[in-house]
Structures are given as structure tokens and as C-alpha cells.
Image: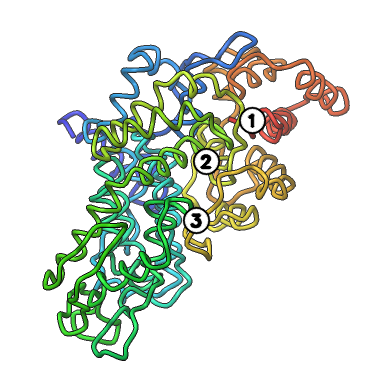
Amino acid sequence: MNRRDFIKAGAAGAALLGAGCDKVRAKLGDWLGGGGIPDAFQIAAGAETDDRFHLLNRAAFGPWPGDLERVSKLGADGWIEEQLNPDGIDDLACNLRANGFDSIGVGAGDMYEFEKAQIERDLTRYTVLRAVYSKRQLFEVMVEFWTDHFNIHIGKSECAWLKTPDDRETIRRHALGRFRDLVRASALSPAMLVYLDGRENKKASAEEKPNENYARELLELHTLGVRGGYTQRDVMEVARCLTGWGCRHKGQWMKAKVEFHPGEHDDGEKTVLGHRIPAGLKEQDLERVLDIVCGHASTARYIAEKLCRRFVSDDPPKSAVEKVAQAFAGSNGDIRDVLRALLKSDEFKASKGRKLKRPFRFVVSALRAVGADTNASPGLLRYLGAMGQAPFQHPTPDGYPDEAMPWLGTLLWRWNFALALLTGSIGGTSVKLAELAKAMGAPAGDPTPFFLRHLMGREGLPVEKEAVAAYLAASPLADWNKKQEAVGLILASPGFQRC
């Protein structure tokens, strides 16, 4: 923060002493350039979806007003490179909005001082606010991707208290780093040790059998994939390698501390995926397992296929998967290099409109598109729950699905959300539609053609224009309430729900 920003922040704080904390943080964020609507900004033109819009629809949670100019200024490749180096992007304004929750930033052991309901609420609101307001958009998109990949349901056992540190120390710390580092951090995360029973994986006697839960998911979901070539024997051997790792229970001294217990470790010789692991390595068995599974060819292909399914299409072309897999293998799992290859591929550029937005992306992209002011209150979060994608609440280890089919039953709630958003019916969330229309240069009479271009990234299709015209004919635009409803109709349309 430079001197000018400091003075602005101080003035803002003095002016808002009587306001609530959420309002103070939001206003400070706006004054520091992290939210709010610019005085004027470009909107897309042309029958085809704007290339900049497509990039922002996939590598970000949709464009914020003014983002198209940012991509034009840097060029698509320049924008990608900037996003791949998020530490160089000033995100102070987003931090002011998102970091004000008591339980965010607290160490694992101290999380038990908070009530479970507060922790869940804080983490969910924090996640939504960062997705909406962060300028490090690709980073936030990858945080969501890895959160699904290493899914932890906060409803199990002590996971509610441990997921916040996992989000910070595992997912966010390594989201754009090296894949092996990410897997290792997950393997030794207290939240994962609890969720997949890693801390119950012991062999203190000849009769005791290792717990295979984490070993199975490590191979099936986190690295090689279900068709990755491993066998039940490999699962058993990996489980043996990981015996003895655990974390302390909430009732113990130094709760949530991760530690290795040699007396509970099977220290005999093992063979994993054809690789011999000699006896006597103790905790180093973990490192050998990670070297084997993270360096396996099946892992490169599995991660590439998942990334292409998320960024390209539900049934990604083999050519794209092969390019991304080669980048993964050639860079030793450097996530930045992998994303660089994916986002610059011809297959990515040609995939416009092929993905149905999942509920989280739909809600966040709608908030971003209209430059909403939100504090991610329970009123907003209820829509995510009703649509079936409340963050951190998927019950099984595979994470929320990417494919469109499981989400088709959420369309009614999407329509309800779009109308509620534009008519100011969601507590803690507001939209300044007249200000948005003025900034995009829309005429005062009927701004809907401009909103079609702004929200779709292209000229409206004939069927879209006809639908809006039919609504206007039935409900003349006598005031901004009616105009807001018309824009809500566009947000609820199939064109906006796809990316």
C-alpha cells in the first residue's frame, strides 16, 4: 500500500466508523480498486463469442466489468502469464473484503476454540468472496479445482475444524506449484488424515492390518486414476508404507499435530507398482511412494484429462489431453507449465460454449458480471446449497462432478437466483444496474441489447432477442425494477449458463 492508498484507506475508515464491518471492508475495497464499477468499460461485439470473454469465462470466474480491456492491454498470453504469477498481482482490496473472519488464518490446533457452525460459515463466505473479488482469478479457479480433487467433507468427524488450515496450507499454498508438493501436503494434512482415516492406519502388531482407505483414494482419485494400472496388491502395499502417520485428536495435548509413530509402522520390504521399497526406511516410505505415484505416466494423463474436462469440455479431445499430459511429464508436474500448455492450446480456444457452469461458477460469474456488492451472507449461500454445490459439503472423496448431467436439475434454482439478484431480494447483496448501464454506454430507454452483449460476450442470438422482446412487450419498462427483471431473464438464459 503506497502513501496515497494509505490516506484513502484512513479517510474511508474515518467516514465509516458508524457502519458495520462488512460495509467498511467493502467500501475500503472499492476505494482501493477491488470492486465497484468503472466509469466506462468495453463490452463485446460480433456474432461470435469474444475470445477475451471466453478466456475469462474459463480461466477466471467470468469477467468483471472492465476485464476485457485488461486482456486487450496485456494480450491473451500476457494475461495468462500475469495470472500464473499471482504474487505479483495486488489483491489488497479483495483481502480487505475476505480476510475479516475470525477463524480464517488460525492454526489447526487453535481452531477448536471456535464453534463448528461459525467455522463452516466463515470458510464458505471467505471462499465466495475471494472467488468474486480477487484479481488473482486463475489462482482462485485452481483453488476450486484442487479442492474438488482432494475433496474433504467438513461434516465428517473433526474435519470442520481442520479444513480451514487445509485450505490455506495445502490447497492455496500449492495451487500453482508442483503437483508432488501438493500431494505430499495433502497426505500429511490433519484434515485428510481424519477424512480418509489415515491416522487410523497402524500396524503395531503382526495381527493388525493397515487401513487402506487413504491408500486407495491416493491411487484412484489423487494420482493414477481408476484406470491407472494399479492393483489391489498395490493398494495394500501403499497402505503398509503409510502406516504410523497420524495427528492428535481434539481431546489431546497439542491437538491436530501431525506426527510419525515408528512403533505403529510396518517397516518391512514393500513393492509398489513394480518398484521395490527396502525395509528400514520408516517415514521415508512416504517419500518413496510419492516419487513413484507422482512420476507415473498414468498420473500425468489422469491429471491432464481432469484439467481438460474442467477447462475444455466434458468429453475433452484426445489431442488436448495428450498435450497437457506431455507438459505435466516434461515439467515434472509443474502446475504453471501445465496450465500454460492448456490455456494456449487450439483445443481450448475452440471450445467456446461447451461447458455448463456448475452452480458455484454460475453464482460467482453472475455476481462478477453485474459488479455486485456482496458480503456472501447466508441469504446468498442458501442458493448454493439449494443448487447442490455448497462449498466443502460433497460427501464422497471424488469431489463435485464436472459433467453437465448432474447439474441439470438445478435450473429452477438458477432462475430464482438470477431474479432475486437483480431485484435486490438477497440480503447483503446489491446491484447498481443503472450505474452499470451508464458505464457500458447503454441508452436510457432500453438497455437490454447492451446487457445481452455484456453478459453473453457476443451479440444476442435471434431467439435470445425474441425472448427479451416478448418479456418487454408483456411488461413495459416503466421503471428500473422492470429493467432489472429483464436483465435477470438474461442471466437465467441458457447462453449465460454456459461458458
Q: Residue placed at 87% from the left, 22% from the top?
A: 473
Work out which quarter of the rendered image holds the C terminus and state it.
top right
Secondary structure of the residue carrying tag 1 is helix
At label 2, the amino acid type is Val
| Vertical arrangement, residue 190 with respect to residue 377, above or below | below
Rounded to the nearest angstrom, the CA distance separating label 2 from label 1 is: 12 Å
- Residue identified by numbered label 2: 364
Q: Residue placed at 53% from the left, 65% from the top?
A: 395
Looking at the image, is mark 3 or mark 2 nearer the viewer?
3
Rounded to the nearest angstrom, the CA distance separating label 3 from label 1 is: 24 Å
Which mark is first along the chain, 2 or 3?
Answer: 2
- Residue identified by numbered label 3: 399
Rounded to the nearest angstrom, the CA distance separating label 3 from label 2 is: 19 Å
- Residue identified by numbered label 1: 496
At label 3, the amino acid type is Gly
Q: For label 2, count other residues whose C-alpha is less than 10 Å away and answer few (under 14), some (14-19) or many (20+).
A: some
